[in-house]
Structure formats: C-alpha cells, structure tokens
C-alpha cells in the first residue's frame, strides 16, 4: 500500500512540472518521460513491476486529457494548429485507441509493454538525432490515408502511454508540415488519443482489483490529479518558449535523455 505522503507528492509535482513543460516545448516527451519515472516511483514503493508498468502507462495517458487542452490553447493562439489535419486523423485515432486500450493493453504482460516502450522511445530518440529533411514534393496523404495513419498512432500510443507526438510530429514534418504547425497539431491530437485510450483502460481494468487506495483498475487517481495540475500549469509556458526559441539543440539533448529512459525501461522489462 502506498502512503501518499509529502515525498510522493513532491516527486509527482516535479514529474508533472517537467513533463508538462517539455510537452509544450517540443510537442513530444510527456508520456515518454512520465512512464519510466512513474514506473520507478511505483516500483520503489513496493508495487509489483509488471503492474507498475501498466499503471504508469494508463495514468500517464489520462494526464494528457488535461495537458493537451492547456497546450493546444497556447498553440492555437499562435495559429499553429492545423484543424483540417485534426479532423482527418481523429477518427482513426479514436478507433485505434479503443482497440489498444480495451484490447491489447489487457492481453499484453507488463514485461512486453515495458520492452515495447523501450523500443519505441529509442526509435523516437534516434529520429530526433537524425533530423532528416523530407523530400520537398512530399505532402500529407488523402483523407483515407490520414485516417489509417491516425489508427496506427492511436493504437501504438495506447501501448506506451504517450500522446502520439512521437509519431505524429515526425510524420507531419516528413510530409512537409512546418515544424511549429506539426507540434501544435500534435498537441491537439493528444486529446482524442488520451480520451479513447483512457476509456479503453477503464474497460480493460474494470475487473482488476484496486491495487492501491485511490486506484480504479489501472488508473492511479492521486497521481493523475497531482501530475495533471502541475503539467497543465507548465505546458502553456513550454508552448510560448517553443515559439521564440530554436529548439534544434534542445531536441538533441532531449534525444539523449530518451535513450537513457529507454535503457531503464529495457531493464524493467527483464524484471517485470
């Protein structure tokens, strides 16, 4: 049983502050940072590693419901949200998210999810480091293609507890969407991703006994409340900084941090 004392509250506040700022600044990183640290926080207090991974993923995803709304307002105010792309990508995202949260998430073991997370975070870090330039003639696919892409983003996001920016931002940049529009649109996509997957986690975890006081299935509500409050406060600041800063160097530093987090989750997969 976890005692929600001041040390735990302080850790969760710090985690929400950092991840909220990074999500607003780079459009990626909220869930990628939150899941490893949440896994560590829960595991260090006696939660079984496999369950800690699942709770970290589900709780991380649920916080994006709040972070995305806060971040998207700041990006929209600067004209950086492509609502036309959101409308085409969202239907597939919702379908993929429900399939992931309500289906695959319940079937896969914590060890498999930790390994899957490590691989995708490592891949995302590599993409940030390479910073490849797209072919100048490449454009976003049509409506059907965008719906299919949205389905993949929603499905994979649910397995790693991230808002999908680790896929949507590189994909949009690859299709010659300007970087700030890609980041802003990705922030807006975070809400349907989080909504669909969180509903899926609730369905999948409806028969799972509460592992901790305040837990509903895989969701740990005290952590959700604390992290969401902190991240909502800092996400708009990160978005404002993003519109006045050259983030190229920050992305390289962040990529190195992601490699470290991927290594930690790889280690966790061995003990989960």
Image (cartoon, rainbow, N blue to C red):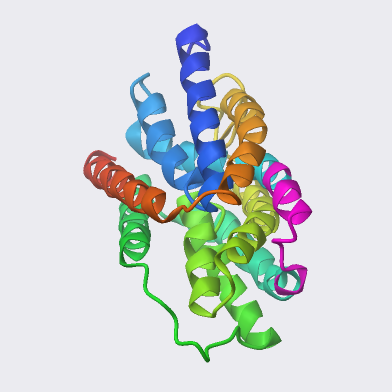
Say which quarter of the image contains residue 126.
bottom left
Point out the stretch of residues depicted in magenta. Answer: 70-85
Considering the whole magenta stretch, tell me its main secondary structure: helix
Check residue 72 for magenta coloring. Answer: yes
Quarter holding the C terminus is top left
Outermost residue on the top side: it is: 6
| x and y, in percent, of residue 81 in the image | 71, 62
Q: Nearer the viewer, residue 235 or 213?
A: 235
Residue 177 vs 61, above or below: the answer is: below
127 to the left or right of 206: left
The image position of residue 270, as x and y in percent, is: 21, 44
Residue drawn at x 53%, y 15% is 9
Q: Residue 210, can we see it?
A: yes
Q: Residue at x 67, y 47 (%)?
A: 68
Report whether 101 appears left or right of 50.
right
Residue 57 in the image: above or below residue 7: below
Residue 150 lies in quadrant: bottom right
- Horizontal relation, residue 133 to residue 213: left or right: left
> Where in the figure is residue 267, as x and y percent of width and height?
22, 42
Quadrant of res 13: top right
231 magenta-colored: no
Using the rendered image of the protein, determine whether residue 205 is visible from the camera's viewpoint. Answer: no
């Amino acid at each position: 049983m976890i005692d929600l004392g001041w040390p735990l509250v302080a850790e969760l506040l710090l985690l929400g502050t950092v991840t909220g700022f990074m999500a607003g600044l780079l459009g990626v990183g909220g869930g990628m940072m939150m899941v490893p640290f949440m896994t560590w926080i829960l595991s260090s207090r006696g939660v079984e590693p496999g369950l800690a991974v699942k709770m970290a993923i589900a709780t991380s995803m649920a916080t994006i419901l709040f972070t995305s709304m806060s971040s998207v307002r700041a990006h929209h105010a600067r004209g950086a949200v492509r609502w036309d792309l959101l409308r085409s990508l969202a239907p597939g995202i919702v379908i993929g998210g429900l399939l992931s949260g309500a289906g695959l998430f319940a079937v896969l073991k914590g060890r498999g999810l930790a390994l899957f997370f490590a691989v995708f975070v490592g891949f995302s870090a590599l993409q940030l480091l390479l910073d490849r330039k797209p072919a100048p003639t490449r454009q976003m696919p049509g409506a059907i293609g965008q719906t299919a892409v949205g389905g993949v983003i929603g499905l994979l996001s649910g397995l790693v507890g991230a808002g999908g920016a680790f896929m949507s931002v590189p994909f949009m940049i690859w299709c010659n969407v300007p970087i700030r529009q890609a980041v802003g649109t990705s922030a807006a996509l975070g809400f349907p991703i989080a909504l669909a997957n969180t509903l899926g986690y609730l369905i999948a975890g409806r028969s799972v006994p509460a592992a901790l006081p305040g837990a509903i299935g895989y969701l740990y509500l005290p952590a959700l409340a604390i992290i969401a409050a902190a991240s909502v406060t800092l996400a708009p600041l990160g978005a404002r900084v993003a519109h006045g800063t050259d983030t190229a160097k920050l992305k390289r530093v962040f990529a190195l941090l992601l490699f470290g987090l991927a290594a930690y989750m790889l280690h966790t997969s061995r003990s989960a």
